[in-house]
Amino acid sequence: MILKNANIHTMESKDYDKGYIKIENGLITEIGSMEDYKSGSDKEVDLSGLDVYPGFIDAHSHIGLMEDSLGFEGEDINESTDPVTPQLRVIDGINPMDECFKEALEGGVTAVAVSPGSANPIAGQISVFRTYGKRIDKMVIKSPIAIKFALGENPKNTYKDSEQSPITRMATAGIIYETLNKAKRYYEDKQRHKENKDEYDKPEYDAKLEALVPLIRGEIKAHFHAHRADDIFTALRISKEFNIEPVIVHATQGHLIADELKNENVDIFSGPFLSERSKPELKGLTPESPGIMSKEGIKLSIVTDHSVIPEQYLTLCAALAVREGMDEEEALKAITLYPSLSLGVYDKIGSLKEGKYADIVVYNGTPLDFKNKPIMVMVEGNVVYDRLKEEK
């Protein structure tokens, strides 16, 4: 397939006012100016006057774990019977038949990082999925990409009436420290046994510690739920002690410490800010936050935290950030390029580049105009949504 005569927004260093994209076996194999285009495809799609973008990526979502229109029956986000559950995998809880996946595609969101909730100090494993499909195993882009941690108000509220720790910020951090120390020792004991089986016994298998080994080895990241500035700094403190790579999820007060975050060179997932201030930690919530941090040079991602904000409104969140001071190009990168880098899937998605999946969204104009809807959405080169056909 050839998409031609399009205004191509690559999210990389070069765009094309009138360009073409060649797609073979689900991948982008050529991209360039129409001046260099040589006809020869049996299937050419003329997109004259239309704008082409990479499929949008939500770097922090609970889609499929918090099912649409259901209560407890469809809520598989928090295993709040145990504060330490790193062995839990979101792939075992997601229902891809949830109507919200279809709505996400219609909104141009082609990939999501799905995370466990924030009830537990250590909640489980995060993975990246396509939003198109009916079997979750075939929707995986990368799994796992991170372990979910939570600081602050949520773990405190979850366990305050259960006669179980944690009920303070000290205890929440203490549980994380203790578990990571155990995981480090577990990994070291495994290595000693591997190098000298005669002298060192193999440690007894522990599912929780085993799940944390990739984190200790630096193969995956730590996503820390943190709203307040003090909790953000606790996440950074823990990460430095164990030499793990953190991502700050939400960072509601991030704009108040933007200079510090810039110096830390830490990834930020900003949002949701198109929502109410439903608890004390959200008192300082403002849609100006991503713009303030972005101007400090922080390459952040904008997120919905679906189902807090429905997945299909990711572009609306980016548009609100622009209205409140964020650069438009940076806002577009915050839902394409930057999440792909933070999630470790840049080689596959996040920009329009040769060798990447042909995950593509076609608009008439900018996605940051709330009146605009995607005209066409492609996943791996397949047209999965065509609004013009739907309307007919």
Image (spheres, rainbow, N blue to C red):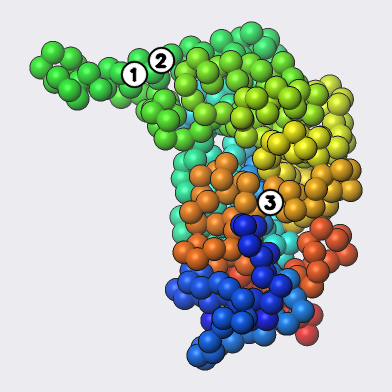
Q: Would you identify the image quadrant in which residue 74 lies?
A: top right
286 relative to 11, above or below = above
**Residue 62 is at least partly visible in this image:** no
Q: Is residue 185 left or right of residue 135?
A: left
Residue at 81 percent of width and 39 percent of height? 291
Are the residues at dot 2 and dot 1 in contact (C-beta closer than 8 Å)? yes
Residue at 52 percent of width and 18 percent of height? 240
Mark closer to the chain start, 3 or 2: 2
Measured Cα–Cα span from mark 2 to mark 1: 6 Å
Which mark is on residue 333?
A: 3
Q: Is residue 328 left or right of residue 78?
A: right
Which mark is on residue 182?
A: 2
Mark closer to the chain start, 3 or 1: 1
259 relative to 275, above or below = above
Q: Name the spot of residue 369 as percent of width and height, x first.
A: 85, 61
Q: Name the spot of residue 134 as percent of width and height, x first.
A: 54, 62
Residue at 73 percent of width and 25 percent of height? 259
Looking at the picture, which amino acid does disc 1 mark?
Answer: Tyr
Are the residues at dot 3 and dot 2 in contact (C-beta closer than 8 Å)? no
Q: Is residue 287 left or right of residue 306?
A: right
Q: Name the spot of residue 90 as percent of width and height, x first.
A: 53, 42
Categorize mark 1 by other alpha carbons within 10 Å: few (<14), some (14-19), many (20+).
Answer: many
Looking at the picture, which amino acid does disc 3 mark?
Answer: Lys
Q: Would you identify the image quadrant in which residue 165 lies?
A: top right
Q: Which residue is under mark 1? A: 186
Measured Cα–Cα span from mark 3 to mark 2: 38 Å
Residue at 81 percent of width and 35 percent of height? 292
Q: Name the spot of residue 303 as percent of width and height, x first.
A: 71, 44
Q: Is residue 95 left or right of residue 347?
A: right
- Comparing 90 with 224, the one in front is 224
Looking at the picture, which amino acid does disc 2 mark?
Answer: Lys
Which mark is on residue 39?
A: none
